Structures are given as C-alpha cells and as structure tokens.
Image (tube, rainbow, N blue to C red):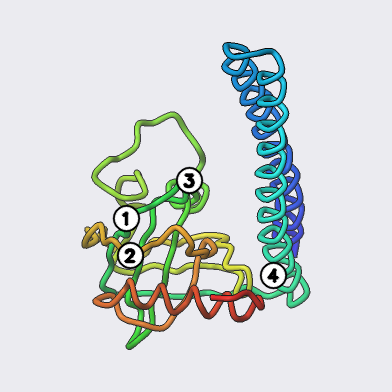
Amino acid sequence: MEELSRIQEQAKADSLAGYVFLLVLFGFGTFVLGEAALWLGEFVSDILGTTARLVAWGLGCVTAIYALAAFARGNREKRRLINSDIALATVQEVEVWESRVAEVAAIDSRQPVIAFEINKNKLLLLQGQWLIDPATYGLPNDDRDPFDACVNGLGPPNSFPSSRFVVTRLANSGLVLSIRVLGDYVTPQGPLEALETQFEFPDSEILDGELSDLPSALSRAHKKRLLIKGDRP
C-alpha cells in the first residue's frame, strides 16, 4: 500500500511538471515567434510588423491551449486509472517464460519498446525509459557504463529481455513496479515497424494478437482504448 501511495504522489508531481513544461515551452515559443514576425514585418512597414506579431501571438496561444487541453485529457485518464488501482490495493504479477520477443521501433521518447508473445493470441507490450532504469530490476543506480549488448543496458544476470521473468504491475493503469529477471538474455527480433503516432499505450499492456501480426494487434488495441474512453477511433 505504501508503494501505491508513492505512485499516486509521483503521478501528481509528474502532472505538475508536465503543465509547467508546456507553459514555459509555449510561452517562450510564442514570444519568440511574435518577435520574429515583428522583425520580418517591419521590413515592409511598422503597422505590418505589429499586426504580424499579434497574429503570431494569437496562433501561439491557440496552439498552447490545444496542447494543454490534450495533455489535461490524457493526464486525467492516467490519474483515474491509478486511483482505481489504489482503490483495489492489489498488484498483478505476470510470469513469462520461453516467449517470442521483438523490439519495436520507437517513434517518440518512450523507448525502448518490447513486445512478448506470452500465450496463444496474447501479447505483453512494455515501453518506456523505466526499462533501462536499474531500480526497475531492484538494483542501485550507479555510474557504470551501460551494457550495450542488452536492451536494458544491464549485464548478466540482470539482462533483459530474458527467457523467464516476472513483471509486477498495476492492472488498470499499466504502471510497472518491478521486473524480476529469472532467465538468460534473449536477443529480440526486429526492430519491427508497428507503432503509429496516434497510438497511446501505458508502460505495460496485455493485448490480443500475435507477434507475427503486431501492427494490427496494436491498432485494434488502440481503437479499443479510444472506445472505452468515449473518443472516436
């Protein structure tokens, strides 16, 4: 329960940091855009320069509002799922062994991305920089150079993905609390081109499908998540 409370507090801190980052980013960007428009417009006339700056500021503000609204929607959904996990006060352990595994080509900062075929027509998707954090595997952080031969940057016996492991996760939000490596390192296939920019998945997701048809499996899972949230696919 203490771990769940810590996760809730971390989610609040991450939410605040996200809002601050967006405000600073768009505030500074809008100001610079306006000044650039003013400078260019003044080559023609002072009036055009002032008008161009106002238009640029307006576009920047509209973009900022859209970005903040999108972030707020995603953040509310994430915190709702975390709160539902805390209300249940339970965690899920998924043990995987002798599974086919593939690395998925990342399209943003949420990398690495790994997919496991854990059962007939069942896949386990793991994604995020937490996969290369030693704390995920119960190890202290240190200044040692990463072990580049493995996806998670850790040498044996903590190299991941492995032939057998246990993921401890929150079932609703998909947040991963830990990974216990119990087998030898397995070199994944890929990287496979399967993700699209509109896909939204948590740190971990159990979904229907097979590794041989991963793009379709991810697309179906994404559409299902949108339907659950009430958005149009």
Residue depicted at x 75% and y 44%: 16
Which element is circle 1 on? loop
Nearer to me, 136 or 35: 35
CA separation, marks 4 and 3? 23 Å
CA separation, marks 2 and 1? 7 Å
Side (left or right) of 130 relative to 212: right
Mark 4: amino acid = Leu
Q: Do callouts 1 and 3 mark residues in contact (Cβ within 8 Å)?
A: no
> Against 129, is 42 above or below?
above
Q: Which residue is mark 3?
A: 133
Nearer to me, 189 or 74: 74
Side (left or right) of 130 relative to 24: left
Mark 3: amino acid = Asp
Looking at the figure, which quarter contains the N terminus? bottom right
Which element is circle 3 on? loop
On residue 214, the disc is none
Crowd rating for badge 2 (residues with CA inside 10 Å; few <14, some 14–19, many 20+): some
Residue depicted at x 22% and y 58%: 187
CA separation, marks 1 and 4? 27 Å
On residue 194, the disc is 2
Q: Which residue is mark 4?
A: 81
Crowd rating for badge 3 (residues with CA inside 10 Å; few <14, some 14–19, many 20+): some
Q: Do callouts 2 and 4 mark residues in contact (Cβ within 8 Å)?
A: no
Q: Position of residue 58 (x, y in %)?
A: 72, 37
Q: Which residue is mark 1?
A: 105
Q: Do callouts 2 and 1 mark residues in contact (Cβ within 8 Å)?
A: yes
Residue depth check, mark 1 versus mark 3: number of the one nearer the observer: 1
Residue depicted at x 67% and y 36%: 60
Which element is circle 4 on? helix
CA separation, marks 2 and 4? 25 Å
